[in-house]
Image (cartoon, rainbow, N blue to C red):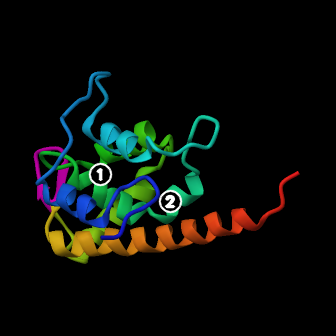
Amino acid sequence: MTTNSQGTSVEELCRKLDGIESPDATDETGAGRSEAFVAEATAGIDTGESFSFLERLVKESLDELLVVLVAVRDGGAHGEGLMGDMADVFDVRLSPGTVYPRLHELEEEGILEVHELVRTKEYRIADPEAARGLVERAFEQHFALSTVFDRALEEFPTR
């Protein structure tokens, strides 16, 4: 079982992507499902100050984050709602010109499926195995980098 320093395993994330173990629709503060999911995942991060995501890193992992945000919703997700989640959860304001092309590519790759509604499109996970694979590869890369950074910090002299 692969686990990160906060104790989240790839298997746990895969269960959540499969919908077997999804967070409640809202927590006691009224935060939405996506916000609660990310808050739980980052709760163990102790930087000595308030934690915030770097916009550049969020954008670099946009495909994976969109897949995760679509997966943690009970129903489908629409682009505007996903952009709202990115703003609320990651404090990153993305334009439609950034988000929609990524959603379309994920659809073309068969990871997401789109349902045309009256005035919007709703995205759902089309291929859970491919979605898990995409997120798992990103997790492994980010975890490996965090391990290198953690080890490097041990080597830095302290004053």
How many residues crowd mark 1 within 10 Å: few (<14), some (14–19), many (20+)?
many
- Helix, strand or loop under label 1: helix
Which residue does the numbered mark 1 point to in the structure image?
A: 69
Q: Nearer the viewer, residue 119 or 131?
A: 131
Residue type indicated by callout 1: Leu
Q: Is residue 129 magenta?
A: no
Tell me: 137 left or right of 56.
left
Residue 84 visible at all: no
Which residue does the numbered mark 2 point to in the structure image?
A: 59
- Helix, strand or loop under label 2: helix
Residue lying at the far top in this picture: please name it: 29
Q: Main secondary structure of the magenta part?
A: strand
Quadrant in the picture for residue 27: top left
Do labels 2 and 1 touch, CB within 8 Å? no
* N-terminal-most mark, 2 or 1: 2
- The part of the chain drawn in magenta is 114-124
Q: Nearer the viewer, residue 113 or 5?
A: 5
Give percent across and percent down for residue 109: 25, 77
Q: Is residue 122 magenta?
A: yes
Residue for point 32% across, 47% down: 82
